[in-house]
Amino acid sequence: CRFSPCVLVISRARQNPFHCAKANFRTHVGRSAGETEPLQQFEALLNVTHLLNDGGKNWFHDMDRVSASMVLTVALGLHCPTGEEPDLKEVIACIAELVSLCTPSASIINVLPFLDIIPGPMPWRKRAQAYRKREDILYDRLITNAVSGKASGMHTWASVLASEDKPEGDQRRLMNQLTTGAIETTALSLHTFVLACILYPHWIPRAQKEIDAIVGQNRLPTFKDRPRIPYIEAIIRETLRWRPAARFGVPHQSTVDDSVEYHGKEYFIPQGTIIFAVTWAIEHEQKRFDDHDAFRPERFLDNNGNLKSDYETSVFGFGRRACPGIPFAERSLWINIAMMLWTFNIRKSDELDPRTGLSFKYDDSDASFNGEFSSAPFKFPAVFEPRSVQRAEVARQEWAECEKNLNVLLPQPRER
Ligand code: HEM
C-alpha cells in the first residue's frame, strides 16, 4: 500500500514481494501453534483475574488487552499486563488508523482508485504516507527489541523470521500485517461473544454444564480439555459466523481471465477484477443456516453433541491469501471463552447509557457495530458475576501460582 488502501488491493495481483516470507510464516505458525498454548492460557487466566477484580467494569478494555498481549508476546516478546503500556497504545492507535483508512467511505480513492494517477500531495496520499511512516518507526523499534532480546528473551515469531535471511523490509511489514490482522479480529470476536451471551443467553446453561462435566469445580479449563468439549468449538464457529469480523471479506483480484458457472449461467471475470466474497452473505444464507440471525451454537452439533464435520467457513478468507493465523486465533478464542464461561455468569448491566441517561439498550443490529471494513460492536456495559465464591477463589489461586512461574514463560530480557 504505497498511497492508499485501494492500491493495496491492486498491488496484490502483482508479484507479491512478501509472498515468500508469508509462506514461511504460514508454515511456522501452523507447526508451532501448539507451542503458544502455555502463553495463551496464562493470558486468559490474567484476563479472568482482571474481570474478577472489577466485576467486568472494564471488560471491553480487558478483551482488547488480552487479545493484544497474546499476539504481541508471541510475536515480539511484548507482554502487556495492564493494557496501558505505551507501545501497546501505539500499536492500537495504528490499527485504528489502518481500519479507518481501509473503510470504503474514508476517502474517494477507496471508491475510485484510478484517481490515484493525480500527482502531488493529495489528501489521501498524505494521510496514507503519514500512516506508513508512523507504523514503520513503531515496528522497527519493536522488532529490533524482539530480535536483540531487549524485549522478553523468549523465542518470538520476529526472531524466527529474522533468522530466515529475508530482506528486513519484508520482515517488518509481515510482522506489522500479522499483528494488525490478529489483534483487532480476536478482540472484536471476544466482544461479539459477550454480546451474544447477553442477547441470546439460552445456550449458556448447556455450555456450562458441558464444561463442568469435564473440568469439575476445582480447576479452570486447560487446552487438554479441548477435544472433550465440542460445545466450545460450536460457540467459536457461531461467534465468527453470526457477526463475522470482516463482514464484506477482504477483496482479492483475479490474475487471469476466468469464468465461473452459477445457477446454470456462465459469468466471465476479466483479469484484474476486484472481487469481494461477501462473508456476511455466505454465513447468513438462509438455506444453510436456519434462523440465521439468531445466535445458536447447537446448529454446529449433531444429535450426539459432536461437532458437525461438513461445515466450511468463509470467515478466514480464501485461497493462498486465507488467514494464516487460524490455529492461533482458534486457540485464543477457545481458552478465553472456556475460562470465562467456567468462572462467570455474564449478564446485562443496569448502568445507564451516558448518551441518553436511560437504561442501556442492547442491540445486535448494524447500528450497534462500527466499521465497514471490520465489524466490531460498539462499547457496551456487561456484568461478570462469579458463578460461586469457590470458583472465584480457585481462579485467584491459579493466577497466584502462575505468576510465580512467570519467568519460565517470559524469560527476562537477555543481557547484551
Ligand atoms: C478471529 C480471528 C481472526 C479472523 C476472523 C481473521 C480473518 C482474516 C481474514 C478474513 C483475512 C483475509 C483473507 C483473504 O484475503 O482471503 C485474514 C488475513 C490475515 N490474517 Fe487473520 N484473522 C484472525 C486472526 C488472525 C491471527 C491470530 C493472525 C496471526 C497470528 C492473523 C494473521 C493474518 C495475516 C498475516 C493475514 C494476511 C494474509 C495474506 O494476505 O496473505 N489473523 N485474516
Image (spheres, helix red, strand yellow):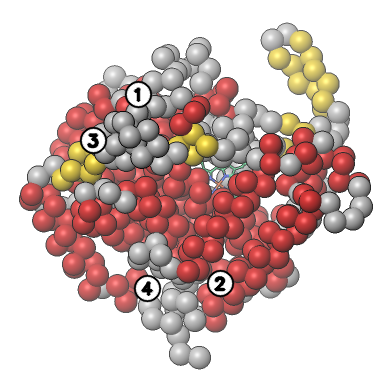
Characterize the local packing of mark 1: few (<14), some (14-19) or many (20 or more) Cα atoms within 10 angstroms. many
* Residue drawn at the location 65% of the way across and 70% of the way down: 137
**Inter-mark Cα distance, 4 to 2:** 16 Å
**Can you give x and y, in whole percent of width and height, for residue 43 in the image?**
33, 59
SS type, badge 2: helix
Q: Which of the two discs, 3 and 1, sits closer to the camera?
A: 3
Q: Residue furthest left?
A: 390
Q: Which of the two discs, 3 and 2, sits closer to the camera?
A: 3
**Inter-mark Cα distance, 1 to 4:** 38 Å
Q: What residue sits right under mark 2 in the picture?
A: 142
* Residue drawn at the location 8% of the way across and 49% of the way down: 389
* Residue drawn at the location 85% of the way across and 56% of the way down: 121
**Inter-mark Cα distance, 1 to 2:** 41 Å
Of the numbered discs 3 and 4, the one sitting upstream in the chain is 3
What numbered label is drawn on residue 296? Answer: 1
Q: Which of the two discs, 3 and 4, sits closer to the camera?
A: 3
Of the numbered discs 4 and 2, the one sitting upstream in the chain is 2
**Can you give x and y, in whole percent of width and height, for residue 292 in the image?**
44, 18
SS type, badge 4: loop
Q: What residue sits right under mark 3 in the picture?
A: 350
Q: Amino acid at mark 1?
A: Arg
What numbered label is drawn on residue 410? Answer: 4
Characterize the local packing of mark 3: few (<14), some (14-19) or many (20 or more) Cα atoms within 10 angstroms. few
Q: Nearer the viewer, residue 158 or 8?
A: 8
